[in-house]
Amino acid sequence: MSAILPVYRRSNITISRGEGVYLFSPEEKRYLDFASGIAVNALGHAHPHLVAALQKQAAELWHCSNMYQMPGLTRLAERFVEATFADKAFFCNSGGEAVECGLKMVRKYHDANGRPERYRVVTMEGGFHGRTFACISAGGNDVARKGYEPLMDGFDRAKLNNLASVEAAIGPETAAILVEPIQGEGGVNVATFEFLRGLRAIADKHGLLLFMDEVQCGMGRTGALFTHQQAGVKPDIVSAAKGIGNGFPLGACLTTDAVASAMTPGSHGSTYGSNPLAMAVGNAVLDIILAPGFFAHVSEVGATLKSGLETLAKTYPLLFEDVRGSGLMLGLKTHKPHYEFVERLREAGLLTAPAENRVIRIVPPLIITQGHVAEALEILTNTAKGWV
């Protein structure tokens, strides 16, 4: 009997090392990694710039707590402020923690402004915001929520891309709107730019905060640092993680001065958050993804990959229902149960990630080339032929 808590649907594949966009088994079988640790390894595996930054920091200082000034923390926060809407940044260890921080700021903001009765948050059907108790209460994943009832109070559900539904969910106790610009776990469901702009207008109309959860779709995955930037929308809070540390545990909660003014010493914190190792990796990631031409590359290879997937879906209409997503956050929806196809792809040397509603997530490292796209499409096509 395994000593591991049985909370993951694990494949029989064993991974021993990674290099670039490939993973390898102990027997050196090579896998093209189009799952990226579920959109985490944005710069692939063992990237030399990240390895060097982590090794250098590991030889100097691992941890000293947030009681002291840390140059790496200051630099990373200033870089995010310069590149985004934000005035302040808080760093933690994961996406769930980043969302928790945002939810706490929502309540603290309204309490500090004399409206403590405002604590409820409108979230979207199909949303997923993490595994903490507040996050599963905010999300709409039935599997993640089952057995944990009664859930935390304070969340009301609306329909994605339906502004009337959002308006109907707002009441006198509503404090914020929480949305993923692209729902990852929920099935790569894309919020239209019109919808995101409409949410900003609704939030302004009712005096609410607009909270964007970009844990999965952020950090360059859709061809910009954050997806909301492509929509021309300025949120009040953004949660980020996954690609921010390329596999090193790191999350961030970004916000404005107006929201941050409610947060005081002791109102939030994290033992490991902002530790020097994480800050070194986070800065190394930004060195690469903020370089000129990086986002354009993501858009270019993403367009080629999406076009190839659309051709695959048209070629095998009995197998595939549609293709959705943006940049290098794409989904291929199947008619049949998708876990079987995901496993067949693994056997053929291509790794993908299943999502809800029979959707296969295709979220490769952002450094893939057109050659890697062609390799993936060839495996997908050959596997589809054997799945008919």
Image (cartoon, rainbow, N blue to C red):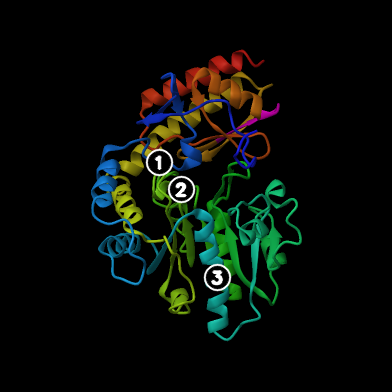
**Looking at the rendering, in which quadrant would you find the C terminus?**
top right
Q: Which mark is residue 42?
A: 1
Alpha carbon separation for disc pair 2 and 1: 8 Å
Question: Does residue 69 appear in the picture of this structure?
Answer: yes
Span shown in magenta: 331-338
Asked if the residue at tag 1 contacts the one at tag 2, i.e. Cβ–Cβ closer than 8 Å, the answer is yes
Q: Residue at x 46, y 69 (%)?
A: 269
**Looking at the rendering, in which quadrant would you find the N terminus?**
top right
Left or right relative to 246: residue 69: left
Q: Secondary structure at mark 1?
A: loop
Q: Which residue is mark 3?
A: 104
Give the image location of residue 178, x and y in percent: 59, 61
**Of 236 and 197, which appears nearest the observer?**
236
| Mark 2 crowd level (few <14, some 14–19, many ≥20, 10 Å Cα) | many
| Mark 3 crowd level (few <14, some 14–19, many ≥20, 10 Å Cα) | some
**Of 188 and 284, which appears nearest the observer?**
284
Q: Which residue is mark 2?
A: 242
Q: Secondary structure at mark 3?
A: helix
